[in-house]
Amino acid sequence: MAVYRLANGYELSDEEIEKRAREWEEGTWRGSLVNTRAGRPRLSEEENANLSFKCPISAAALIARAAELSGVKKSAFMREAAVEKALRVLEAAR
């Protein structure tokens, strides 16, 4: 009999899985269902906008190296850099 450890630490056996399946099929299951959102977690509560751009291979390699040294993904690195630059430009325009 196999035992599976769930993300919350609960251990679920093959026997318990079969019992729950039987209850579900018979309409006697007393558990609750949870809605889950598939995909990556949201960046914020706002809707997301997709931005893309082209750049020379050398610039892409530079970004990749800097992101790796920073310990973040390229997308996070570029997102943070773009927001920082936008804030500086807007502040200077005041």
Image (cartoon, rainbow, N blue to C red):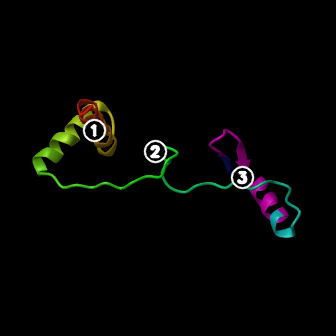
Mark 3 closeness class: few <14, some 14–19, many ≥20 residues within 10 Å: few
Measured Cα–Cα span from mark 2 to mark 1? 18 Å
Residue, x 11% and y 51% (percent of image)? Answer: 56
Tag of residue 43:
2
In the rendered structure, which amino acid carries the disc numbered 1?
Ala
Examine the rendered structure and indicate whether residue 34 appears above or below residue 82: below
Q: Position of residue 22 (x, y in %)?
A: 82, 65
Which residues are drawn in magenta? 5-23
Q: Which residue is label 1 attached to? A: 86
Q: Nearer the viewer, residue 87 or 77?
A: 87
Mark 2 closeness class: few <14, some 14–19, many ≥20 residues within 10 Å: few
Q: Residue furthest front?
A: 94
Measured Cα–Cα span from mark 3 to mark 2? 41 Å
Examine the rendered structure and indicate whether residue 20 appears above or below residue 94: below
Q: Earlier in the sequence, mark 3 or mark 2?
A: 3
Secondary structure, mark 3, is loop
Residue, x 18% and y 55% (percent of image)? Answer: 54
